[in-house]
Amino acid sequence: MVAKGVEVELAWIVEDPGPIETQPLRRVRRAVPSPGPGEVRVRVEACGVCRTDLHLAEGDLAPHRPGTVPGHEVVGSVDALGPQASRFAIGSRVGIAWLRHTCGACRYCRAGRENLCPYSAYTGWDADGGFAEHAVVPEAFAYALPAAAAAQELAPLLCAGIIGYRALKRSELPPGGRLGIYGFGASAHLAAQVALARGATVHVMTRAASARTLALDLGAASAQDTYDAPPEPLDAAIVFAPVGDIVPHALAALDRAGTLALAGIHLTDIPTLDYQKHLFYERQVRSVTANTRDDGEEFLRTAHDIGIRPTVTPYPLEQGDRALADLAADRVRGAAVLVAG
């Protein structure tokens, strides 16, 4: 219940996590949030819909708080400053991403590995995100964005792009190497563009025919079904689909000394691996955990330099539940993005 006279807005919250068919996302009217010390409030222009939002809604990720507003690919303009906030002026174009707090003092933060900080906090999980008309963020964790770019094209860069970029780094793809990509949604189609711009040969394995078409349109050398073998051995591979059954297939497709990066925050159980078939000859598998702010800044510069173009399926903010359901059913081409009115 919002007190009389308080400014209100539309928002979506995760009320009772469960299968998407149970409609775990609920539309509400809530009080417009106020920024605290060192924070800025952003009037949302667009917010990407990430598979992590789906994991939260369906309970694959245990909620950290009740009634959380999902969304961590937020583009908007600063419309209020909290006490001691001075990094951005009112009207500045900024982005809000997944990582929203680290302690800055632990051994991981001191070593430049803040993505592993035990005290880290995340937008749309530990604090309300961008499936709303406003969002609040610590100014130190916001990204400056160009004023002229389309909001719905910037939004997927803030998680799908950044995480895909870190996964690409973790895969240790050599210059001009052969990269396999398993699953081809929002994150994968952006990582593929970076790899292609660097001269890689990209092979895509994914179940959706429309995603295979998109992969070929972007310049992939081949596109086949998820469990099909690529046409040549791979120097590196990334699994974006949250399906553990894919892992043995991806490892078997690696050439000697190849590296497999697992990009998701959630993955179903991995079957038993055969040492000779899947790991021998110094093949390795590596996980990806969030990102550092340096990763984000580096990727945003790279995206600008190579002219990366997200493929976007837009939805009005009022259809947040439909966007999440379409993502669950693989009905989204590229990245789903909520656009505020």
Image (cartoon, rainbow, N blue to C red):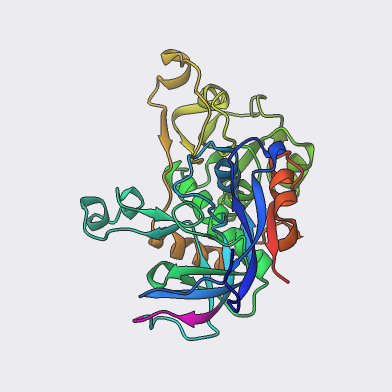
How many dots with numbers?
0
Q: Quarter of the image holding residue 47?
A: bottom right
Front residue of this view, candidates 129 and 203: 129
Q: Which residue does the image show at 36% across and 81% down from the upper left? A: 83
Q: Residue 30 location in percent, x, y?
A: 60, 65
Q: Which residues are magenta?
A: 78-84
Residue 83 among those drawn in magenta: yes
Asked whether, in this view, residue 293 is left or right of residue 15, the answer is: left
Q: Which residue does the image show at 47% across and 86% down from the upper left? A: 89
210 relative to 145, above or below: above
Asked whether, in this view, residue 278 is left or right of residue 329, the answer is: left
Q: Which residue does the image show at 65% across and 24% down from the upper left? A: 227
Image quarter where the N terminus lies is bottom right
Asked whether, in this view, residue 307 is left or right of residue 323, the answer is: left
Is residue 307 visible in the rendered image? The answer is: no
Q: Residue 108 location in percent, x, y?
A: 25, 51
Is residue 161 visible in the rendered image? The answer is: yes
Q: Residue 282 location in percent, x, y?
A: 37, 26
Front residue of this view, candidates 157 and 93: 93
Q: Which residue does the image show at 35% across and 53% down from the upper left? A: 120
Residue 264 among those drawn in magenta: no
Front residue of this view, candidates 36 and 283: 36
Image quarter where the C terminus lies is bottom right
Q: Quarter of the image holding residue 54?
A: top right
